[in-house]
Image: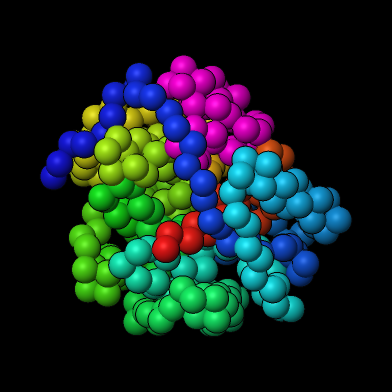
């Protein structure tokens, strides 16, 4: 493995992003497939939409291009666009959800990508929940497994994209996707940078992360338990939960600019800023 991460004092530069989002038009918590969901408590749909609109506005204010896939009735979790695919210069990989409640999202996202010049989209054989568990960090492609995406999916992605996937095992059910426990702060191959919560990973995966990113920012349980790690960075600005105050301080010390966005209503479905954002890398 190559230790290419940058020191904490590296200069920070914002890079424009092209992202895909899905408005929470049909968002609700009508079933429970992760520890954050409570179907017994009604969702404030108007508040969820207002918070999502706020996130979109922040992205646009930062100079990022935002595209929106139409929401499909009966798919309340489609708002979590990160789970819709993995889009890279080497190709686009679709998804196959573990839970049948989300199965219909896969083809909705694949069709949108193909209709907008981001196909063909590979329809996976193995369970693979998109950017929730597959994160690009420079030349590295990190793959989470343990709760949703399986290791077999990592090998499938390697074959489709022609690039290796570093598998990381998640061991805390609160952090069922990799993007709930690790933030890609800078995916520039010249100075990749990440932050992660060590307690979400098994010992072997922690050793792997230490080797790959010796200068990584390490966070604590207080940050992780408010899904503070579920953040979106453009290399300078980091859009994150306002409840992750300690994390914001750590980011400032490393030269990043925290941009708090309240998504508390969408957190009730188990997602924050990153879950609502699929990066289109073409």
Residue at 35% x, 64% y: name it: 89
> Which residue occupies the foreground of this view, 84 or 269?
84
Could you tell me how many numbered marks the image carries?
0
Question: Can you give x and y, in whole percent of width and height, for residue 122 in the image?
Answer: 38, 80
Question: Position of 114 compared to 57: left or right?
Answer: left
Name the residue located 34 percent from the left edge and 24 percent from the top edge. 10
- Give the magenta-colored segment's residue range: 233-260
In the rendered view, tell whether residue 143 sits above or below residue 110.
Answer: above
Q: Is residue 271 above or below residue 94?
A: above
**Can residue 191 be seen?**
yes
196 displayed left or right of 242: left
Residue at image location 15% in from the left, 41% down from the top: 2
Q: Residue 246 appears at what percent x and percent y?
A: 55, 22
Give percent across and percent down for residue 35: 57, 53
Scheme by which the image is coloured: rainbow
Residue 235 drawn in magenta: yes
Q: Position of residue 110 (x, y in %)?
A: 51, 78
Quarter occupied by the N terminus: top left
Closer to the camera in the image, 155 or 192: 192
Image quadrant in which you'd find residue 4: top left
User: Foreground: 62 or 170?
Assistant: 62
Q: Is residue 73 left or right of residue 147?
A: right
């Amino acid at each position: 493995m190559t230790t290419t991460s940058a020191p904490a004092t590296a200069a920070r530069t914002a890079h424009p992003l092209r992202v895909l989002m899905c408005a929470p038009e049909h968002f609700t918590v009508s079933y429970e497939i992760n520890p954050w969901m409570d179907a017994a408590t009604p969702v404030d749909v108007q508040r969820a939409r207002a918070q999502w609109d706020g996130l979109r506005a922040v992205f646009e204010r930062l100079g990022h291009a935002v595209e929106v896939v139409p929401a499909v009735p009966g798919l309340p979790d489609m708002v979590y666009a990160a789970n819709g695919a993995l889009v890279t210069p080497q190709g686009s990989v679709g998804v196959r959800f573990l839970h049948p409640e989300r199965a219909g999202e896969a083809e909705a996202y694949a069709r949108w990508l193909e209709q907008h010049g981001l196909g063909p989209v590979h329809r996976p054989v193995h369970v693979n929940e998109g950017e929730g568990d597959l994160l690009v960090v420079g030349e590295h492609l990190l793959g989470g497994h343990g709760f949703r995406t399986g290791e077999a999916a990592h090998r499938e992605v390697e074959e489709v994209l022609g690039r290796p996937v570093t598998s990381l095992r998640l061991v805390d059910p609160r952090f069922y996707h990799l993007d709930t426990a690790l933030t890609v702060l800078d995916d520039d191959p010249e100075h990749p940078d990440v932050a992660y919560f060590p307690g979400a990973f098994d010992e072997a995966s922690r050793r792997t992360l230490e080797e790959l990113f010796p200068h990584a920012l390490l966070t604590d349980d207080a940050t992780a338990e408010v899904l503070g790690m579920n953040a979106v960075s453009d290399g300078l600005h980091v859009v994150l939960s306002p409840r992750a105050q300690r994390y914001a301080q750590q980011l400032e010390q490393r030269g990043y600019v925290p941009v708090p966005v309240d998504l508390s209503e969408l957190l009730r479905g188990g997602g924050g800023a990153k879950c609502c954002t699929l990066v289109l890398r073409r």
